[in-house]
Amino acid sequence: MAVKRGYNDCLSTIKPVRDFLDVLSGKWKIPIIVSIGVGNDRFVDIQESIPGITPKVLAKELKDLEQHQLIKRTVVGEYPVKIIYTHEPYAETLTPIIYAMKDWGIGHRNKVIGTRKE
């Protein structure tokens, strides 16, 4: 029995998209990457820049992003100890994707909600 071409084409797209979603899915990972990208490098600064995120969730998501080599955690040996979060160069590969999602979101909001004319 021959496998349909559409099936293989579909899988060749779905599998890498699933990999992307496995790493970056959820409510918080992309906002964290954006926050660090605009210069928020300390835990409290990242937390304050993302409304609604709890310290526990932020800590977990930062560990996940570090594990996937998207961010780097650096301990500065001063007193008191200071922890800095920065992008790894690999995170820069997400920049065009994030901007594409931003553009789509703006377009979608305008389409669904409409642009208010005052």
Image (cartoon, rainbow, N blue to C red):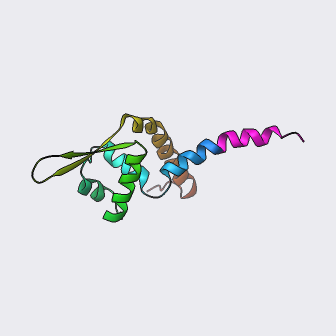
Q: Is residue 67 magenta?
A: no
Residue most toward the right?
1
Q: Up-down: is 83 above or below 48? A: above
Q: Residue at x 49, y 44 (%)?
A: 103
**In x, y percent, where is residue 65?**
40, 48
| Residue 54 visible in the picture | no
Name the image quarter holding residue 70.
Answer: top left
Decide if residue 97 is on the left or right side of residue 55: right
Q: Is residue 9 magenta?
A: yes
Name the image quarter holding residue 39.
Answer: top left
Q: Which quadrant: the N terminus? A: top right
- Viewer-side residue, 82 vs 47: 82
**In x, y percent, where is residue 5?**
80, 37
Q: Which quadrant: the C terminus? A: bottom left
Q: Residue at x 33, y 49 (%)?
A: 35
Residue most toward the left?
79
**In x, y percent, where is residue 111?**
57, 52
Q: Up-down: is 100 above or below 27? A: above
- Viewer-side residue, 79 vs 12: 79
**In x, y percent, where is residue 104?**
53, 46
Q: Residue at x 37, y 53 (%)?
A: 63
| Residue 88 visible in the picture | yes
Decide if residue 2 is on the left or right side of residue 52: right
Decide if residue 75 is on the left or right side of residue 26: left
Q: Which contiguous range is marked in magenta?
A: 1-14
Q: Residue at x 66, y 41 (%)?
A: 13
